[in-house]
Amino acid sequence: MPDVIKLLPDSVANQIAAGEVIQRPASVVKELVENSVDAGGKNIKVIIKDSGKTLIQVIDDGSGMSETDARLSFERHATSKITSAQDLFSITTKGFRGEALASIAAVAMVELKTRKAESEAGIVIVINGSKVEAQEPCSCPVGSSFSIKNLYYNIPARRKFLKSDNTEIRHIVNEFQKIVLAHPDIRFSLYHNDTEIYNLAPGNLRQRIIGVFGKQINQELITIDTDTSLISLKGFIGKPENARRTYGEQFFFVNNRFMKHPYFHKAVAEAYQNILPSEAIPSYFIFMEADPASIDINIHPSKTEIKFEDERSIWKILLASVREALGRFNIVPSLDFENEALIDIPVRSSSGHVPEQPKIEINTQYNPFDHEETGNERPGFIERFERENTTNWEKLYTSLEKEKENSQQFEKIRESERKFFQIKNKYIICPVISGLMLIDQKRAHERVLFERFLECLSNDRAVSQTDMFPVTADLNPSDYFILKEIEEELELLGFSFQHSGNNKITINGLPAGTNASDPVEMLEILIEDYKITQSDPSSGAKEKVAAAMAGASAIPYGKVLNQKEMEDLFDTLFACKSPNYSPKGKPVISIIPLEEIDKKFK
């Protein structure tokens, strides 16, 4: 029987390795930018065309490579980062496996130009599908310039499975953010289709976070700083009121390397327990410094899954540190010592003299019921209080009229045997033959709006209401590309946008009937909801957008509903195709059987 096991050619082996290392264009950006950081680059520029499908270029002013090193860098398991297995336990660089460039060259057309400071000329190497096509001297600045063209050109099936341009550029932005946050001392820039997305000057960590996520985040940051013999923690956590319902601004770093660590995330989440609702996720930018020998980063080719020697102890330190930072933020008052209006506190002198007790001057002639002017001026806040009450006295009768109308409406509903009650401004209760029906008012409205919006998207029709005063929203790049990804569907629903450059948009119109008091907030909620549903493979693009839009437009918990509103919501809910579940699959209706109620009184 002939032998069946054969050695794979290097080109095939590299393509297989590329499947693990180079999963999408963002993977190429990650590997090349990390190499630039390892090379000591202080100015790193990333240029993207067509979300990385046409071109990914990374230019740095690092140490550069000699001709021999440049050629060897594309061989599998060729690296300058380690020389023995023992080095795996003291890694301080980003890369060390020696797989990235070989994997990239196997699935793309690659051109490298590089020069060392002591060399008069540089070297250019051209590789297509692992095959070296050119290697010759060239004129170029000190450092390296990698150009990756036509990614997956020789693997059409893999290229076909890439997502839309907006999705792929969003992944690139996310990878870019992880690296630039870890190195605030380096200048980074990112361009997509000749449009500048980031131009980040060197600075401290707070400045870098603001540069990446916008000026508004500056007011949301709480400092965290803890040193122990086991680990050092530094960075920032977010204020509770700014927590979101999706992941996006959660960053762990160890020795300036980004890592994913669900176990440590639970420690942060537990520190916020009883402060945040269960669905809210706090933001954090936490940097850990640990002995390289106490961590293992050689678990996965992406090098983002890291094991610690004593994870349980670090978990406790992290929990205590976040709680201490939150306690300091909530309890310790901030004093403005530069304010000139300081309180003069008398102190006992060395002579033993006791300061004189302060005297209070009292006007014995003052009559609070006398409205005629006297020698004493009446406090401004009293005048304002009386003026407001004089002006607004009619509102008392208006509210009584409304109460009377609600009472009359209730009488009509009672006559028709339909009764609705609201509990905690969250649930609607309605008696039914079998017991009591409970309806979650927000989820019910989401279901109604979801089916309405889905019908608009299916029929390509919607009514838009133009805003008399258009508002501008300044989005972070990741959210901006999500908006561009779903912009066509949003316009079908009735949104009207105008792009102003630098991730800014002007909202000129909203879907009719949304009645949003803050269009920017509504848009932010919509994007957050879309992030939750976008990974659901069972839903199409229209369903995801409709669900996000319903979540952003639905009546919130805490809103008081009158009898007519509860009745209308009840009727429209049961006119839906699927009234029992919200667009996210959560229950809308629950019935407490009469038998369960009877048991409570036995």
Image: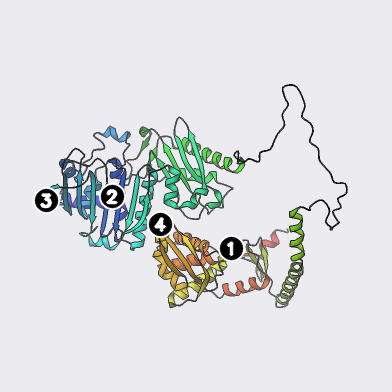
Q: Residue furthest right?
A: 365
Q: CA distance from mark 2 to mark 1?
A: 44 Å
* Residue type at numbered disc 4: Pro
Of the numbered discs 2 and 1, the one sitting upstream in the chain is 2
Q: CA distance from mark 4 to mark 1?
A: 28 Å
The residue lying at 72 percent from left, 31 percent from top is 346
Q: 10 Å neighbourhood of mark 4: few (<14), some, or many (≥20)?
A: many
Residue 2 image label: 3
Q: CA distance from mark 2 to mark 3?
A: 34 Å
Q: Are marks 2 and 3 in contact (CB under 8 Å)?
A: no
Q: Are marks 4 and 1 in contact (CB under 8 Å)?
A: no
Return the residue at label 4: 477
Q: CA distance from mark 2 to mark 4?
A: 25 Å
Viewer-side label of 3, 1: 1
Identify the secondary structure beneath mark 1. Answer: loop
Q: CA distance from mark 3 to mark 1?
A: 71 Å
Viewer-side label of 3, 4: 4
Viewer-side label of 2, 1: 1
Return the residue at label 1: 556
The residue lying at 69 percent from left, 59 percent from top is 599
Q: Is residue 564 visible?
A: yes
Identify the secondary structure beneath mark 4. Answer: helix
Answer above or below: position of 385 versus 224.
below
Of the numbered discs 3 and 1, the one sitting upstream in the chain is 3
Closer-to-camera residue (104/270): 104
Residue 21 image label: 2
Identify the secondary structure beneath mark 2. Answer: helix
Q: Are marks 2 and 1 in contact (CB under 8 Å)?
A: no
Q: Is residue 581 visible?
A: no
